[in-house]
């Protein structure tokens, strides 16, 4: 059962947007998906609550009488949306679960420097395990200096850049209805699906 973790120690970088759309992608392929939300804000859990019954099903954790959480029976793919400030034993616990980690990064000098130590830690963890790590640029306008700086930064890390997602209202409008870009007619989100292609190819490996 592949476990994809979306992580960045900084808040507000697009973790929930990425996690919900990854879950939406897996569901669009007919997989039995669980989207687990470990963030205090519970944005992904809220998104699940907004999801229409007609949409492809995505489950959340099951909590037993001992308050132990686990994927529902029959789950084939797990996506975890993690909290900001992930470090220490919580970081180690999550890394033990993960097959793949995706790190969303925004083209901001503050986000870049706030994430550097975390990415170095992931790179070290990657060397010692079979963990796969990828970076996704979030809300990127390729015409800006900030985007150029983001490119320079990620090129220096030695970690693969899976893609860059643009700043668009599509994600906001779809999230408000519990949907992903994979839940609507492709013609409505054609440009966004094009940006997701390399990310989806990496998820499917």
Image (cartoon, rainbow, N blue to C red):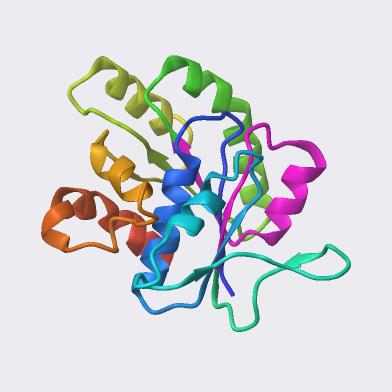
Where residue 15 appears, x then y in whole percent?
49, 42
To which quarter of the image does residue 119 belong? top right
To which quarter of the image does residue 21 belong? bottom left
Q: Nearer the viewer, residue 183 or 155?
A: 183
Say which residue appears at 36% left-offset and 35% top-offset.
Answer: 138
Q: Specify the farthest residue to the bottom.
A: 74
Q: Is residue 107 above or below residue 91?
A: above
Q: In what quadrant of the picture does the N terminus appear? A: bottom right
Where residue 132 appears, x then y in whole percent?
54, 56
To which quarter of the image does residue 167 belong? top left
Say which residue appears at 72% left-offset and 58% top-offset.
Answer: 96
Residue 79 forms part of the magenta stretch: yes
> Which residues make up the magenta segment?
78-104
Q: Is residue 96 left or right of residue 60?
A: right
Q: Nearer the viewer, residue 77 or 153?
A: 77
Q: Is residue 200 above or below residue 141?
A: below
């Amino acid at each position: 059962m592949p476990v994809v973790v979306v992580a960045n120690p900084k808040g507000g970088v697009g973790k929930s947007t990425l996690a919900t759309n990854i879950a939406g992608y897996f569901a669009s392929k007919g997989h039995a998906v669980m989207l687990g939300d470990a963030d205090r804000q519970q944005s992904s859990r809220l998104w699940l609550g907004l999801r229409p019954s007609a949409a492809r099903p995505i489950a959340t954790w099951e909590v037993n009488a001992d308050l132990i959480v686990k994927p529902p029976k029959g789950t084939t793919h797990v996506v975890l949306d993690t909290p900001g400030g992930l470090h220490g034993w919580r970081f180690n616990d999550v890394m033990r679960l993960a097959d793949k980690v995706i790190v969303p990064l925004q083209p901001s000098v503050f986000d870049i420097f706030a994430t550097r130590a975390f990415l170095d830690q992931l790179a070290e963890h990657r060397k010692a395990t079979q963990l796969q790590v990828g970076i996704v640029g979030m809300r990127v306008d390729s015409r800006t200096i900030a985007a150029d700086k983001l490119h320079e930064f990620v090129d220096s890390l030695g970690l693969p850049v899976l893609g860059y997602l643009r700043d668009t209202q599509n994600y906001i409008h779809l999230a408000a209805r519990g949907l992903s870009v994979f839940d609507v007619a492709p013609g409505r989100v054609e440009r966004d699906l094009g940006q997701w292609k390399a990310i989806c190819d990496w998820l499917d490996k």
